[in-house]
Amino acid sequence: MTASALALHSVLAVESDPGGGFSPPTIAEFYPEPLAEFSLFGIAFAITRITIISWIATAAILALLVLAVRKPSIVPGKLQFLGESGYSLVRDGIARDIVGPKGLPFAPFLASLFFFILANNAMSIIPFAQISPNAKFAWPLVLAVAVWVLYNWVGIREQGAKRYFKDAAVPPGVPIGALVLVTPIELLQVFVIRPFTLAVRLFANMFAGHMLLVVFSLGTVYLLTVGNFSVIFTPFAFLMALVMTFFEVLVIVLQAYVFTVLTATYLNGAVEPAH
Amino acid sequence: MSILAAESANPLLPPWGEIIVGAITFAILVLVVVKFVAPRFEQVFQARREAIEGGIERAQAMQAEAEASLAQYRAQLAEAQAEAAKIRDDARAEGQQIIEQLRAQAQAESARIVARGEEQLTASRQQVVTELRGQIGTLAVELAGRVVGESLADDARRSGTVDRFLDDLDTMSATTGTATTTGPADGRGGSTAYVPQDAR
């Protein structure tokens, strides 16, 4: 519990609160009771509501995409237009413009990433779900590892293993003396930091976003039900919950976009030899 | 996982089970998008590009065709005009030729008529002259014979005399003819009178 939360707790405790004060949300938010548990090859699987939410989000976006291309026509219908707009954004705006001329073959993967993250992120504000699977580190980690494998594989395939690793360790144009510093940093950057930051950026955004929403939502309910003069602060808490929800919409789209753009940037570095 | 266990869990260390479930979910989406959705989108984009390019091509082809027809019509029009002008010129030339021909024919005809008239005239005058000469001779001789009372039985001599007389008359008339007659223009009127042959 943070210092400010403690302070809030002590302030609220001063009031004659029969409930014993405001209890802020904890990390337990992200560990709901499993709906089903089983073990396979010694690996414990727990199907929680977050797992179900992830399946629903993925199934929904898949259904939308498949319906959009079910009867493709030159003059698109509404759904096809929507799907095309989303796919074109990734295909033209990211795959072609950021990865480069060799980027179009990566458009399907980049689009998958974008739509998967977008749909799963969106669950953080969808009523009754209201938590994003991407707030669980496992999902961003899977995505980041997939990206890591892809760009390293593409780099080796396009440039040859020797050239790829040499360029990663010894960037061209760096003075010999600086290599003592540059080489470890570069190697760490390409092979560890990139996937780690990709995963953590998305995870932390969704995690923090969820926590913020829960704090203000629970705060609103608490202030409304606390039964003393604190009730006059209810609108502020409620307003903050609303504002944070809209902010969350921005984060949802932005993080999906940022993840995809960064993936495209890494792929660009892999397909085009360093200069 | 119990709430108590959750309190102590590290959010950055997810259990393997979760990772595998997430990976499978993502893999299914990637598979469907790569195998089905993206190719369909590419197909549509391709079809649309072709439709637009095809439309432009069709429009260009139609424009070229229209231009070709226009040029053809213009050429045909010019040809027709040239032909019309040629026909007009030909007709004019032909008309001219016909006029010339008719004029020549008319001239020839008139010349022929005039010539025949002259011929007839000459013939009849000759006939008249001969007739008159014979009659005049006979009359003169008869008159002279009566006057003289002497029959000039010898025809040969008589005719010689008459001819000589008439020849003398001719020569006399030739020298004085212009003075005695009204002129060559009035020669026709003198068909009953004696007129020198070459005066006309």
Image (spheres, helix red, strand yellow):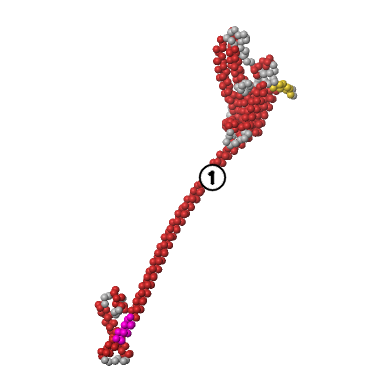
Count of picture labels: 1
Q: In x, y percent, where is residue B14? A: 67, 21
Q: Which residue is mark 1?
A: B61
- In terms of depth relative to the viewer, which is nearer, A126 or A134? A126
Residue type at tag 1 = Ala
Quarter of the rendering containing residue B131: bottom left
| Residue A173: x %, y % from top left | 58, 29
- State the quadrant of the N terminus of chain A: top right
Outermost left residue: B179
- Residue B133 painted magenta: yes
In which chain is the residue bearing label 1?
A: B
Of the 4 image quadrants, the one containing the C terminus of chain A is top right
Instruction: Indicate whether residue A17 is drawn in magenta.
Output: no
Q: Main secondary structure of the magenta part?
A: helix
Residue furthest right as drawn: A41
At a point 59% along the width and 18% down the height, the residue shown is: A213
- Where is residue A261 drawn, in percent x and y? 59, 28
From what the image shows, is residue B111 above or below residue A218?
below
Position of B194 with respect to A129 (left or right) is: left
> Which picture quadrant has residue A19?
top right
Q: Which residues are magenta?
A: B128-139
- Left or right side of B120 for A11: right
Reply above or below: B12 against B76. above
- Whether residue B87 is visible, yes or no, is yes
Report whether A39 appears left or right of B66. right
The foreground one among A55 and A18 is A18
**At 59% across and 24% down in the image, what residue appears?**
A252
Image coordinates for residue B136, horizontal then vertical, percent: 30, 84
Residue nearest the observer in this picture, B146 or A43 = B146
Q: Quadrant of residue A32?
A: top right
Residue at the (55%, 13%) spot, across then down: A233
Can residue A106 be seen here?
A: no
